[in-house]
Structures are given as C-alpha cells and as structure tokens.
Amino acid sequence: MAYELIETIEVGAGGAASIEFTSIPQDGVDLQVVVSARQTTGGNVSLMTLNSDSSGSNYTFVNLQGNGTNKYTDTISGSNYIYFGGTTSNIRTANTFGNASAYISNYTSSVAKSISTDGVTESNETTAWQTMAANTYTGTSPITTVTISRPFVQYSTASLYKIY
Amino acid sequence: MTYDLLDSVTLASSASSVTFSSIDQSYGDLILVSNHATTGGADIRFRVNGDTGSNYSWVQMYGTGSSATSNNTTSDHFFDYGTPTSLGATISIQFMDYAATDKHKSVLARRDWASALTLAAAGRWANTSAITTILAYTAAGSFAAGSTFHLYGIAK
C-alpha cells in the first residue's frame, strides 16, 4: 500500500504538443497527476483526456477561477476534455512554470470517473490564476491512458502517481 | 512519501452511514476520499470521535458555473458537504496532524460534483483529542449502493 510514482515525463528540447502516460497499471485505487508546465501559446489551461477520448463529448466540468482581483465560474457539459488549469502562458515572465494536479478516484472501476483538478499559474507578476474544477468522464472503461495536450515548452514535467 | 490505504468501503447496498473506527495513530495526516451519491436530497456530513457538540467550524468557496460564492459558519455540529444525487461526486478531506493531543484539528476539503459545483473548504474541529473515529452519514435518506470510501494515512 503506497503512493507510488509510476512515471515522470520531462519535455525535451523543441517542446512537445502533448504528454502522455500509457499502459497505466491496473492494480491501484486512485491516480494523481502532478504537472509543472509552461505553454507556447496564450491561456492558462491544459487539455486533459482519458483513454484517448478527445472527440466523444464525454466530459462535464464546473470550475472556479480567481486572479487576485476577480472570480469566475464556468460549466460545460459535453466537453472533449477535462478542465486542467495551471499552465503558465508564454507571454508571462520567462522561466516561470505553473503547477497543477488532477486526482482520479476509482480509476479501474467500470463506472463514470470523477476527477478533481487544481492549478495555479506562476509568473512573478501581480496577476496569477488559481483554478479548481470538478470533472466527470462518462466513459466506463478503466483508465489506461492519460494525455495532457498543449504546446509545452522544454522542461515542463508531468508525474503520474498510483495510490493503493 | 508513504501513503497507505488504511481502510476501504464499497457499499453493496444502500446505507445511512459509514464509520472508520480504531484508526491507526502512527501517521501524520489522514485523507478520506469518497465517491458517492445520497438519496432523498440529503446532505453528506462528517463527525469525528462521535462528537455531536457545536465544535465544527468551516469556511468555503465554490463555483456553480453561474455564481462564485464564499461563506462560513462557526459552532456547527458536523462538517457538511452537500447533496450529490448521483454517483460521480467526490469528496476528499485531509485531517492534519490527527493524532496530536495538543491542538484543535484542521481539515482541508474538496467537494467536486461536475454537474453542480466545485468547492474548497477549510475546517476546524475544536477539540484537542486525537481522532480515532470518523463517521460519514447522511442528514436523511442514505448513501446509494456503489458508493466508495477510502481512508488513507500519510506517514510522518
């Protein structure tokens, strides 16, 4: 019984369009993904998908965002991705990376999956974004693949942990 | 980091409560993760050590997709985390330094139900006793069959 690192992926020179964990062991109870990332585009979020399902409109989320001045909340039903905030934009201070985590409970179950996500951008500026979201994936197959998409810069990292 | 599964409950049939008792006192923190639904629109609530007194306080913020809100309460009789009516709602509660006998106990919680809201809360149980029992229960009705409850210990 443990909190066990399955794999850490670091983006290499030239960047990467996505980070993907495949063949995830099925002997855990919950999964956690922890990310340190910066993207080559604007925006503050990454797109997470499960089991390579990126076109079935099988995700629903509600989020809460704050930037030190304002607060926002959005919800989308029939999304093609999990809301996964905390990826710093390339327009922000150089060498700053955001932090994010996603907690996937009962990932080997045969029912819809619930995913809690948290994220915060880091930019050494007056405005940073903190986000959290409740997500549901209606797919009922056990989770074997986790994909995080965004054009990531070099040195972005993602770690996948198994809890059991 | 050592993160051990101390106990796990999957309800084969509906039940009005789930209790974790005789909790191992050798860890630093506890984390309770539940994935559940309740029937009858009843709230899910948590108590520790069988304490029904006015010793639970919390502050929370949440977003529903249409409104962002923060509120708090003091001297409640439980930690209350709302009314999920279909499976897919997750609650995680971290009990900090739960085995200590010289401080009130702090908790950090998340409640996520994608069709309703995302919520973060901080709470305090105004008692210095070590936590040995955690009760999850519904204000009315019951937990649906298939609800799961996992209790983890994080090593010191």
Image (cartoon, coloured by chain):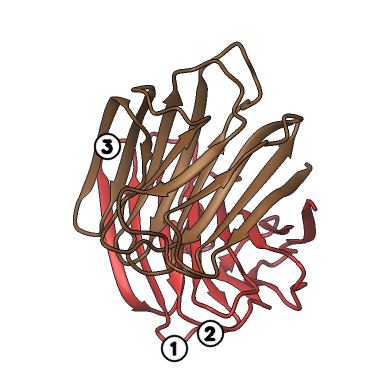
Chain colours: A red, B brown
Mark yes or no: residue A96 visible: no
Under tag 1, what secondary structure? Answer: loop
Under tag 2, what secondary structure? Answer: loop
Three-letter code for the amino acid on which mark 3 is drawn: Thr
Q: Are there few (<14), some (14-19), or many (20+) residues within 10 Å of tag 2? A: some
Q: Quadrant of the C terminus of chain A?
A: bottom right
Q: Chain of mark 1?
A: A
Q: Give me the residue at 25% from left, 34% from top.
A: B71
Q: First in sequence, mark 1 or 3: give its number.
A: 1
Three-letter code for the amino acid on which mark 1 is drawn: Gly
Q: First in sequence, mark 3 or 2: give its number.
A: 2
| Up/down of A150 relative to B67, above or below | below
> Is label 1 in contact with label 3 (beta carbons under 8 Å)?
no
Mark yes or no: residue B65 visible: yes
Extreme residue toward the bottom, this view: A56
Same chain shared by disc 2 and disc 1: yes
Query: Label 3: which residue?
Result: A69
Q: Marks 2 and 1, Cα distance to the nearest angstrom?
A: 6 Å
x then y, percent, for residue B44: 37, 50
Q: Which mark is residue A25?
A: none
Front one among A149 and B13: B13
> Is label 2 in contact with label 1 (beta carbons under 8 Å)?
yes
Q: Chain of mark 3?
A: A
Q: Which mark is residue A56?
A: 1
Query: Label 2: which residue?
Result: A53
x then y, percent, for residue B151: 63, 48
* For discs 1 and 3, the disc positioned in front in the rendered view: 1
